[in-house]
Image (spheres, helix red, strand yellow):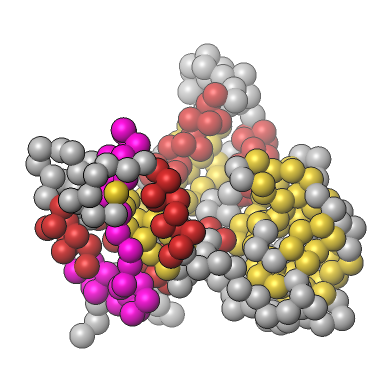
Amino acid sequence: YPYYHLADGAILLVDASEGPLPQTRFVLQKAFAAGLKMMVVVNKIDRKDARVDEVLDEIYELFFDLDANDEQIEFPVVYAVGRDGIVKNEMNEPDGNMGILLDKIVDDMPGAEYESDEILQILVSDLGYSDYLGRLAIGKIFNGTINNNEQLVCIGAGGEIKPLKVSKLQAYEGLSLKEVNRAEMGDIVLISGADEIRIGDTISKKDAPKALKRIKVDEPTVSMKFSANTSPMAGKEGSIVQASKIYERLYKETLRNVAIRLEETDDKDAFLVKGRGEFQLAILIETMRREGFELSVGRPEVIVKKDANGKVLEPVEHLL
């Protein structure tokens, strides 16, 4: 997912008893694709059924299976009991505290690297939306500095260059977001005034535009039909029941959440919503319900891929 491109490294947290899980393989594969340096934390080493050495061997096997590079294979390891705040570098060492993990991050994780202060490069890794500011571009500054109200350009997928004025600049300080007048290399920023921007675009100086390697968003895998509730019990559970209001809410969701796609259907009161899984769509449904919406939803359907002749393609993970 594009969020991986906002980080310089990643920590893989693995249970000392369960070992790597199926979802571990998925997120690790994404981290490797983004070129992140890895650190492993083997957690819950105090469990009676902990098998620390075996789990560490399983992690190495997983790294090899996913074609990790030499730097990623040589990952540092710490052992922890997260519940009690215990961390140590070796199993036979006395119990330490979380400071050991923080020191390990500072010592072993790479810092931000840049080419020149003269070249501005911001890779748009996510999009947001505000009712007051419109579409927001979220990205990490790989090179240069950016100022509020500055006139910049956006480099699209085909190399096309569009003007962009920074109407409001925000940056993260720890976990909080604050408005700033200037941001520099390594900062993660939110830029207002980017109505036509897309994930993977590069924001750069207009006098020296230089694009970064594009990233792409994974395609949706599941679709569900959302429609107005036309049953005799309509209006009993929610106050917002009109199809137009439902469509407006779903459209706003696509502006905030790039993983959601919205399509109209032959039925003017029904809309096809696509996402990356049933859980994601279930969260959307529950959020709308809490906001006062009442709607009908169809069963989830897997989105299949077809070739140029309309034949359904089979999924292939490994081709030998």
Looking at the image, is 160 positioned above or below residue 170?
A: below
Residue 124 percent location from the top left of the image: 65, 64
Total count of labels: 0
Q: Residue at x 80, y 64 (%)?
A: 146
The image quarter containing residue 60 is bottom left
The image quarter containing residue 316 is bottom left
Q: Is residue 273 left or right of residue 131?
A: left
Magenta highlight range: 61-87
Residue toward you, 158 or 179: 179
Residue 11 percent location from the top left of the image: 39, 56
- Asked whether 97 falls inside the magenta stretch, the response is no
Looking at the image, is 262 positioned above or below residue 210?
A: above
Looking at the image, is 231 positioned above or below residue 221?
A: above
Q: Residue furthest front?
A: 94
Q: Residue at x 70, y 73 (%)?
A: 143
- Asked whether 67 falls inside the magenta stretch, the response is yes
Q: Residue at x 71, y 51 (%)?
A: 171
Residue 256 percent location from the top left of the image: 63, 47
Residue 225 visible to the viewer: yes
Q: Residue furthest bottom?
A: 320
Looking at the image, is 161 positioned above or below residue 17?
A: below
- Quadrant into which the C terminus falls: bottom left
Q: Residue at x 24, y 74 (%)?
A: 64
Residue 202 visible to the viewer: no
Residue toward you, 9 or 298: 9
Residue toward you, 281 or 309: 281
Residue 82 percent location from the top left of the image: 32, 39
Q: Is residue 2 left or right of residue 152?
A: left
Q: Is residue 157 left or right of residue 98?
A: right
